[in-house]
Amino acid sequence: MQKVTVQKAVNEYLSLTDKKGLLYDQSNRDAQKEKDLKKKTHVILETFLEECDYLSESVRTANMGEMLRTSLQDIICAMKRKSGEEYLVCNDFFAFLEDRFKVEVKPFDRQLTPLERQLSIAKDMHDFNKARTFDRNDVARRYLVSDRTIDSDLAALHNGICVMDQKLALKDFLLNNKKITAISTMHPLFLTQNLTQIVCMLEGLRRMEDNWALRSYARSSAVSIWRQLSDYARERILGTLTDLMDLERSWYEGISEAAEMEAERMFYNEDESSDSYGRLMYAMKGNLPCSIVYIGDDDMAVEIHGRVFRIEESGIKILAEDAAEPVVIGREKILEVEVATEFR
């Protein structure tokens, strides 16, 4: 089989796209868009030809697909002005390599908008916690942006971003060099529901309020959903559906009032919850140490330090520090709960 160099493969692709535009992406585009993509193709691949130090190697060399992907990834990350369609150019080139030379290259994911990228980083915070590392360069390459862009994203998350009238802020992560830690993680969702589906979610949350440990979670989730509804949807639920579906109107009026009162609320750490039961759930699921003040057998206030490992309808079980057996505390006896805020 005749040797085909990387340089020859790139030049062949450029020659074909000059005549036809993108070869494998057949999305409908107007003439100006096609012209812009042709120009983008030349910018990316001509930069590659200038910077690449393995142009004379065979395009079929082992691991060549990974090498090409890494090089083009670096080029896109370094570009100062991006259209968000650079990935299309590269993926079309990758498809050409596979079709023409049987060289497999993993395509790039779609480039995200700044808001999408910030929300994605926020959702990944728990992964960073688990790994205990946050490498700006790795994250930047993943999203095809520069390190400085990632720094800006983290600053935006720290200061607070607004999505569908929901203000989200991560005040609790530490970033020192490559180490990142966060106490609470957010998990943004995007749902396109009709009114019946929305009512089903709200009804589920209303019933979850019967669970004493989850009551505050259910209420805050219901208020968050209500705040995102349009005025029409709110009026439709309160004015029509509560009667048609035999819903508890007073509950819906309650979350409506709460939504107005919490208009400026940001995403907050669960340990900041004003509800002691909510803090108990937070401590248990995170295996965090906490302090609980409760009414003891002699009707005197007792303080215990330990880790909650069980929450039941009747109360909780907590294993105190240096204790062999758990302590059972009835839920009606719990007075105060404080969760440790230091990073684990």
Image (spheres, rainbow, N blue to C red):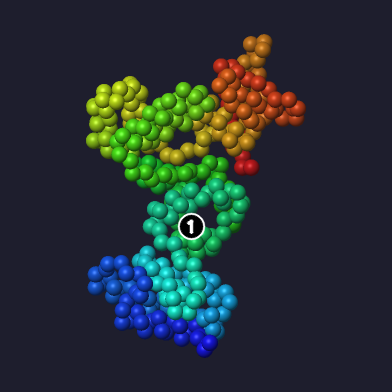
Left or right: where 240 falls relative to 5: left
Picture quarter with the C terminus: top right
What residue is rendered at 54% in x and 71% in y?
66
Task: Give the secondary structure at mark 1.
Answer: helix
Left or right: where 251 falls relative to 8: left
What residue is rendered at 34% in x and 32% in y?
199
Percent of width and height locating residue 319: 69, 28
Q: Is residue 334 visible?
A: no
Where 240 falls versus 31 (above or below)? above
Percent of width and height locating residue 288: 62, 35
What residue is rendered at 27% in x and 38% in y?
230
In the picture of the structure, the residue carrying the numbered disc 1 is 151
What residue is rendered at 29% in x and 73% in y?
34
Amino acid on which the number 1 mark rests in the picture = Asp
Counting labels gives: 1
Front position in the image: 250 or 150: 250
Where 173 falls versus 108 (above or below)? above
Left or right: where 234 falls relative to 124: left
Residue lying at the far top of the rendered structure: 298
Q: Is residue 165 visible?
A: yes
